[in-house]
Image: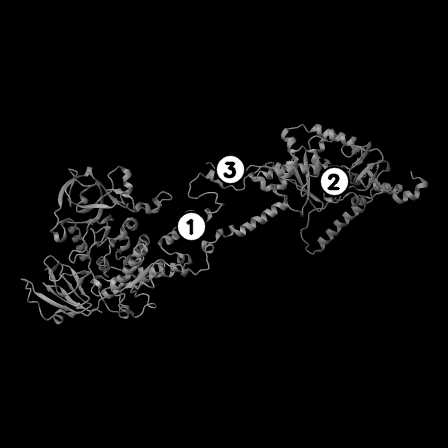
Amino acid sequence: MVTPIMATEGAETTSEDVPVPGKASTRFDLEKETELRFEVEAGEAAEQVDLELLTGMAEVFGSELNRNKKYTFGPGSKIAVFTWQGCSVNLYGKPEVAYVSKDTPMLLYLNTHAALEQMRKQAERDNERGPRVMVVGPTDVGKSTVCRLLLSYAVRVGRRPTLVELDVGQSGVSVPGTVSALCIERPADVEEGFSVQAPLVYHFGSTTPGTNIKLYNKLTSCLADVFSQRCEVNRKASVGGCIINTCGWVKGSGYQALVHCASAFEVDVVLVLDHERLYNELKRDLPHFVRVVLLPKSGGVVERSKECRRDTRDEKIREYFYGFRGVTFYPFSYEVRFSDVRIYKIGAPSIPDSCLPLGMSQDDTQLKLVPVTPGRDLTYHVLSVSSAEDGEEGARKGIVESPVCGFIVVTNVDTQAQVMKVLSPAPRPLPRHTLLIMDIRFMDMK
Amino acid sequence: MADPNKTDELQFYSEILSPSELFAARSRSHKIPVRGQKDFFPNDSDEQRQRLEQSLNEQWSLISEERVEKLGNLVKATWILSEQIVELQSPAGKFWQTMGFSAKGKQFLLPEEALYLMECGNVQVFYQDLPLSIQDGYEMFLSSSTVSLQQYQVFGHLKRLGYVVHRFHPSSEPSSYARQLNLPQCRDRAGRQLKRKRSASPTSSNTEAQEESTADRLEEGKHGYEGEEDEKLPESQLTLSPETSSTQAATASSAHKGGGRTWWMTDVLKDRPDQRPASRTSRWDFSSIPFPDLGSRKCLSSCLASPDPSLLPGSLAVGVCDIALWTQKINLREVKMSSKEQKREEDKRRRRWDVNKDREVQQCRNWAEYRKLLARRQGKRKGRPEHLWDREVTPLHDPRQPIPTGELLDKISVIESTHLLEGASRLKGSDDWRISFNVYQPDSVADFKKSNPGKPYSRMCVCSFDGPVPDLRAIKLLSFQSGDIPVVFAVVDHGDISFYTFKDFQLPTDVFP
C-alpha cells in the first residue's frame, strides 16, 4: 500500500537560497525510484503551486524536468515527480497533499516500455509495423497517465508514436465529445501535456460512448483506417506504432467497443490496468496473437468526482478557445445567419422495431443525420465544424466519417433576426458550413 | 348318335349323356353363387367357419360341374405345338367376326382365343388326336412365349364383358418418325394384314410380333441414343438404361465420396494439417518480449530482469523488479456493479468460451487472418452461407434478392410438371412393361372388321398386384407407344382385376405474380 512519508520528515531543510515572495517553500529529497506526489487544491481561490528541481534528475509522467526551472501547476492538478536516481525538489506554495512514496509501479511501466521498444526494434529490422497498444481499465486507474508515460518514453528514445484518444469524456487531445489521433513528436510538456498540433479529430457529440455506441465504433474504425493509411506512407509512424487510450467503461457495450477497437486497430498488446476480470475477459475474447498484459495501477491515482470531471471538461473547452491558462489565444465572436449553415445531429431517436419497415434494423438510425432547426435551445451548445465539402445532399453521406476542422460555441440565438452569435477560434467566415451539434454545453463565464 | 365302331374311342374322349342326365344338365340353375361380404380376418367363430365352408363348397361344386355342350356346336381345332397356335378343322362359328385370323387359306386361333372359346364351350381342341380338357388348355396354351395366366385372366375378363380384345403389336403403331410426318396409318395396317395373308409360310403371329417388336425396339433405341447424345436435354438422364444409370449412380456416388462429401462439414476438416496449431505463431514472439504481466503467474518469475538500458530513455540503468509484491496489489480499484449487473455478467461469463480454444482461431497468425475468419463466420450466419455457394452446385435462389412469389416458385420448381408424352420419344424401350391388348368397345362388335379394326378404345397393360407400380419412365414409354390412345393398367389380384389409368392433369396455380 501507499506509505505516505510526511514531507517534513523526509526533507527537513527548506531551501533558503531561492526565496519566493509570499510562498512557503518545502524541500523534498527523494531516494532513487521513489516519487513525490502532490495535489493542488481545486477551486477558484486556490493557490498555484510551483515545482523546482534542485539536484539530480526527475520526471513528471515521463517528461524530464529541467533543473532550476519553475513549473507551475494550477488548481486541481495532481502531480507525481518520479526519480530513477534520486533528487531533491522544492515545492513553492501550499499543496493540498504532498508526500513521497516508494511504492510505485514505475519499474513495471518502464519494463513495459522496454518490451514495446524491443518490438519497435524488431519492426524496424523486419520492415514491419510497430506495436499497437491499447490501454484499458476502469475509470481512475491512470490510463491517460500510462499512455502519456509510454508515449514520452517512446519519443525520448527517438520514436514517433501516435496517441489515439478514444476517451470521449476526458479527451487529452481535443475538446470532450470527440475521438482523435495525434502524432507525438516530442515529450509532453510538464505543464501543458502534449503539444496539440494538427490532430485528427472526429465528432462524437457526447461524453459517454453509451449514447451512440454504433457511432463510437464507426469512428474508431475511421481512426484506425486513417492511421493505417498514415502507416503505409510514413515509415517512422508505422514503426512507432500507436498507444490507444480508451474510456473507463468496461462493461456491456463498453466492453464490446473495446474488443471492436482492438480488432479495428489490429492491436498487438493490450495493457489492462488494475482489473483482473477485464484482463481475463480480454484474454478470452481476443485471439491468441494479442498479448494481454495486466498491470497494477499506481497508488497515487486519485478518484475524481463527477464535478471534477465536469470541471476538467470545461477547462478543456476553454483551453481550446483561450489557450493554456487562458492567455495564449484570443477567440472571435461573430454572428452567423441560420440560412448560411446546416446543423445536424448524428443519430435519430430510436424507434420501436415494430414501427420500422420490414427488414430495416435500428442500427441504421444511429448513424443517420438529423437536421436541427436552429432555436433558442441551441444556446451554449458546442458545434463541430465538419470538414465535409459543402456540396449538395450527396456530401451528406460523408459527414459522419469526415474529420472536424474546428469547434464553435453558440453564445446567443436571435430567432427574430435568424442569426446566432458564435465564439470561434478564427475570424469569420466559417471554413465550412456543415455543423454538428454536441450534447456538451460551454458557458463562457470567466 | 354314337357310332358303335367308335364306342371305345368315344368313351375314351367323350361321354354320351343319358337323356335324364341331359335334362338335369339343361334344367340346372345357371346362377353363380354370390360371394357376399368379405370377412377380413378369422375370428374363430363357428358361424364364420360354416359360412366359409359353404362358400367353398359352392365354388367347388361350380367348378366340378360337368360342362354339357352339343357336339354339333363344337368347332374342332388342332393345337400346333411347334407354332403355338390353334388351327381350325371345321368352319368357325360366330366368334370369327372378332377373333382368329387366316393364313395360307387356313383359319387359326391364338392360344388365348382358343382357351377362351374352350371355356365358353365353342371349340374343342385336339392335340395328337386327343381332345384337350380346359385344364389341359390352361397348361398347354399359357406359357411365357404366348400369354401369361394374368394376361389371359384379363383377356377373359374383358371378353366376358363384351369387349373385343386383340393382341397389341408394337409395330402396328406408327413410329415416332411416322407420327411426326403424320403418315396415314390405316393403309399401313391394311397392307400388313394383307401381307400376313399372303405370307408364304404360316409364321406364328407371336414370333412375328416378337420380331417386329425387337425391330421396333431397335428403332426406339436409336431414338433413345440420339437423345442420349444430346446431353443438354434434361430428359437425357431418363434415357439411361438401368445398367448405365446404375453405373452413373455409382460414379456419382464415388464422386460424392471424393470431392463433394464435405460440403456440410466445416472447413476445419478441409484444412486440418497434421501440424499442431501452436506451430503457427504470430510475428511477435512474446516469449522473448518480457512484458511485466501480472496476470500470467505461471510463466513469470518472481523477479523481472532489468531491461536492456539501450531500450530505455536516457540510457537508464535500473535494477530488477520484484513482481511478487505487485501481484497482491491488483484490483485495487473497486468496480461498482449492481446485483443485477453482476448476475448478468456472471451469466455471460458462463455462456461464453475462450475464442482461442477454437482451432481455426489458433491457426490465425494476425488480425487480417482472424478478421477474415470472423467475416466468413459472420457471412455464414447472416448472409448466404458461403460453403453453399462456392461449389459448382449452388442453391436455386439467393435469399437476399427479392423476387415475386410467382417467379420464385418457377425458379425453385426442381421437378417440373411434365406431360406424359413429353420427352418420351427419346426414351429407350424396356421389357419390363408392355402393352398386351388392344381393346375395342362392345358396341362396335356389330360392324367390327378384323382387317380394319379402327382405333382401339384403350390399350391394356397387364400387371400383377404384387408387382411394382409403374414408374414415370414406364408410363411415358407406354403412352408414347400408344400414342393418343389411353393406356389402362389391368392389375390382377389373384383373379380379381381392377383397372387403373394415369392421366395428364394441370396443377392449379393460385399465385399471381
Residue to which mark 1 is pinned: B380
Q: Residues within 10 Å of mark 2 (few under 14, many from 20)?
A: many
Which quadrant would residue B282 be assigned to in this image?
bottom left
Image spot of residue A188 (x, y percent): 19, 56
State the residue at coordinates (64%, 32%): B177
- Going by the image, does B220 lie left or right of A268? right
Of the two numbered discs 1 and 2 in the rendering, the one whose residue sits closer to the viewer = 1
Secondary structure under the numbered disc 3 in the rendered image: loop
The type of residue carrying mark 1 is: Lys
Of residues B271 and B477, which is closer to you in this image? B271
For marks 1 and 2, the one nearer the N-term is: 2
Q: Are marks 1 and 2 on the same chain?
A: yes
Residue to which mark 3 is pinned: B509
Numbered mark located on residue B156 in the image: 2
Q: Chain of mark 1?
A: B
- Going by the image, does B244 lie left or right of A335? right
Which quadrant would residue A81 be assigned to in this image?
bottom left
Colour logic: one colour
Of the two numbered discs 3 and 1 in the rendering, the one whose residue sits closer to the viewer = 1
Q: Are marks 3 and 1 on the same chain?
A: yes
Q: Label 1 to label 2, Cα distance in Å?
A: 66 Å
Q: Quadrant of the N terminus of chain A?
A: bottom left
In this rendering, the answer to whether A10 lies above or below B394 is below
Image spot of residue A331 (x, y percent): 13, 46
- Going by the image, does A130 lie left or right of B226? left
For marks 2 and 3, the one nearer the N-term is: 2
